[in-house]
Amino acid sequence: MIKRFLRWMPNFWALLFLAVPVMGVATFVLADRYNIWLPRDVSEHGRTIDQLFYFILYLTGVVFIVTEVVLFYFAWKYEAKQNTKPVEFSHGSHSLEVVWTILPAVTLLFIAIYQMDAWAAAKMRPPEIPFTCEVTGRQFNWDFRYPGPDNVLYTPDDIVRTDGNLYLPYGEEVLLKITSADVLHSFFLPNLRLKQDVIPGMDQKMWFRATDGGSFDIVCAELCGWGHYKMKGRIHLLKPEEYQAKLEELRQEQNTMRVAETK
Amino acid sequence: MSTVPYDHQHEAHGHAAHGHGHSPSFLSTYVFSLDHKIIGLQFLFSTLIWFIVGGMLALGVRWQLAWPWSPMPILGNLVGHAEGGQIPPETYTMLVTMHATVMIFFVIIPVLAGAFGNFLIPLMIGADDMAFPTLNMLSYWFMWPAFMVIGASFFVEGGAAQSGWTSYPPLSALFNAAPGSGTGQTLWLVGVTFVGVSSMMGSVNYMTTIIQMRAPGMTMFRLPMTIWAMFITATLQAFALPVLTAAGFMQVTDRLLGTGFFLADGATANNMAAQAGGGQPLLWQHLFWFYSHPAVYIMILPAMGMVSDMLSCFSRKPLFGYKPMVYSIAGIAGLGFIVWGHHMFVSGMNPALGLTFMVSTMMIALPSAIKTFNWLGTMWGGKIQFTTPMLFSIAFVSMFIIGGLSGIFMAATPVDIFIHDTYYIVAHFHYVLFTGTAMAVLGAIYFWFPKMFGRMMNDSWGKVHFFLTFVLMNCVFFPMHILGMRGFPRRLADPYHYDTFRDLMPLNQFMSWCAFMLVGVQIIFVINFFWSIFFGPRAGRNPWHANGLEWQAPSPPGHGNFDFQPVIYRGPYEYGSPEVDVDYYPQTQPPTGREVPPPKH
Ligand code: HEM
Ligand SMILES: [Cu+2]
Ligand SMILES: [Cu+2]
């Protein structure tokens, strides 16, 4: 039955391979349409990363379609029963080989150089400002420590929060110090296009300027034990004034708690 | 220089025959066999069994992602320590870890090098066995402690390892970091070390055999691509593996003897007391990926070699650009050693290193591109026969294009900040490893089956198997790219715990349905495989009209492989040569003008 079907439709296999680029393109178009796409970006350098993403997507998209269609075309045209011409007895072509070595080499090198600056901006040029907050990952929670009015961490006026809510201002540059108390975690802010593994014994910096307010998930992206899935936090981006007010509120709260404890 | 003296061949033969000749018992013929073909088949059967185990573990993962916390029918009670069929989070992490471990260390690496390397190398170079048959046998039997240790780890207290197949410390090094960081993790390290010992024995043997045992006339540049790939893979193994073994040993001492290679000062877990410190968790990542990045090429180069052979054979046309193909494999291997850092872009490694790793990683895409173009060039102008192995080979090329291109996103460091450790990565490596390598392996089984068992597999059922596998695996793995672009992280027991990902559940359910069917349709293959061993139509020496040396030997070949002394006159890809009337020109056929016995089939 299979044999009869294939005799009736000799190009079946070629068409199956054509389905690959069709599926690929269709999936991406549908994903865009149904909003299963890059999450909303609310950071400045996130825009650069998204642009780079689209640049590579279009570039590889073209290569993908062209090579897959060529594959289909060859499978269609040179099927043994339909190709009556004698086989092209060729061991290769030196000039073609040179062309398709140099072209991709130049393109790849271009991509590499083109994005160096974005990488350096995201990971190599921290702003020279005091830390806005210290983030500590522990099994299975994110703890936050704000320096308080004196802008210095680990002084008595620090505000310490262990409820997984991180408050930060938008429109301003912020600098986070991140570390871990036990195993590796990864501080991932999808909507800010930021991710940094958190390592015990190592202090790292992370910085960004958010462009818009809102509350978003903080995700742990490095397997950190059985509770990895529930190591969720929330980041709340507030107007600078609101942020200051919120900090003040947290400080009051902490003070009343301290007073309550000492009684 | 490159040919082996005739008498050396006889010496080797005499030696090999010695091992078998005296005790033709069942044990020495089929169990502790020194014959490379039997050892190859032993590897093949073992890996197929573990492939089923690995598949079952994947189903557990997929069940939880589609219907989190709901009891899993049948498998739920079997897989790990599920209670009432429900998968608790620690079991989920175990499933992810062990699925990947099994697939990588027990399926893909041993099936390529162990099964096909063993079976094909002597046959394709015209030798009568491996250079060191006893070492070869040991390389198979050293897999058994690994099989048993890992198998046992599912049943120890706390369950099997749960720190991911990358086993990053401190999670893996601290006893109290997770339920499975107890005995399960130690057994994991021991098991992986045994696999390493086995691979090491294999690679020494492959390198020596290919350099020393080639038949007269088989120059290096007349070797089939399969052999070139195996040769370079063996070299990669030999240089990279000791690093993993050493690192694994260091992790064992961290765990058992209280050293602190990978532990920072003052690290605790689960609020327990601190352990010895003074080390660096990143050191493990460097050492681990120094092996495991080359290892991903160990998992694809032999597949590329076999696909090159199959594509040329069923296009009835010479391989396009033989030498560039060889050089690009060598290029991949060379660059493979200096790109490991691309697994560590967001790990906390010095960002300046990220820049250098990014450039070298981009460059490693180049030889892969050259190979793809050459495969297309091979099909161009041919007379393509859509046999089952050919379909799998074309599928390999088609899927490798996807896997290769998606790698460019990850090589671009700023983009990788976002997609690292999301499902985008899972999509990428499944396109390379599953829809790529595993496709090539299935194709190769259909292709060399007649040589292994003297019978043909059923082609029509092969095509049904191919079609369903091809469609379903794309349904399972392609949407993973989309999940990854949403930032959907991997290894989460319940991703819907996050608000951002809640609406991705229906897509995950679709993928899981397809995954269950994908595993289901492999039954067609299993039945076809075993049925054909006993009842398949008999194959002659050369059922595909191929050129390679192995097709001149009897099917299946007896001890010593060849019933004549092979002498090689040309490369393996002279299909459609105008010099002869038929469209193939076997490597052993003397140049025209001489009387040649007609090929038997
Ligand atoms: C039926 C076929 C398969 C299915 C449905 C499947 C599914 C999965 C799933 C759902 C994961 C979990 C990803 C995560 O949460 O991190 C995974 C991980 C993985 N799979 Fe597969 N897989 C299949 C076959 C294979 C094969 C053939 C290989 C190897 C050649 C493989 C290698 C891996 C690896 C390396 C991981 C990474 C695990 C990690 O590091 O977290 N899989 N697979
Ligand atoms: Cu975590
Ligand atoms: Cu985590």
Image: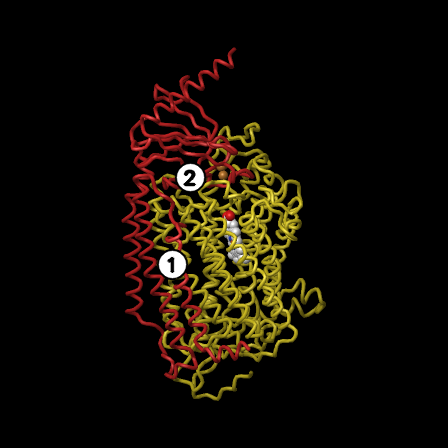
Chain colours: A red, B yellow
**Chain of residue at mark 2:** A
Residue B331, disc: 1
Looking at numbered disc 2 in the image, what kind of residue is underneath it? Phe
The residue singled out by tag 2 in the image is A188
The answer to whether A112 is drawn above or below residue B234 in the figure is above
- For image coordinates 37% across by 74% down, the residue present is B380
- For image coordinates 52% across by 86% down, the residue present is B597
Residue B458 can be seen, yes or no: yes
**Chain of residue at mark 1:** B
- Residue B462 appears at what percent x and percent y? 55, 71
Q: Quadrant of the N terminus of chain B?
A: bottom left
Q: Quadrant of the C terminus of chain B?
A: bottom right
Q: Secondary structure at mark 2?
A: strand
Label 2 beta carbon less than 8 Å to ligand 3: no
- Residue A121 appears at what percent x and percent y? 30, 39
Question: Which circle, 2 or 1, is nearer the viewer?
Answer: 2
Q: Secondary structure at mark 1?
A: helix
The answer to whether B267 is drawn above or below residue B24 in the figure is above
- For image coordinates 62% across by 59% down, the residue present is B49
Residue B53, disc: none
Distance from disc 2 to disc 1, alpha carbons, whole Å, reads 35 Å
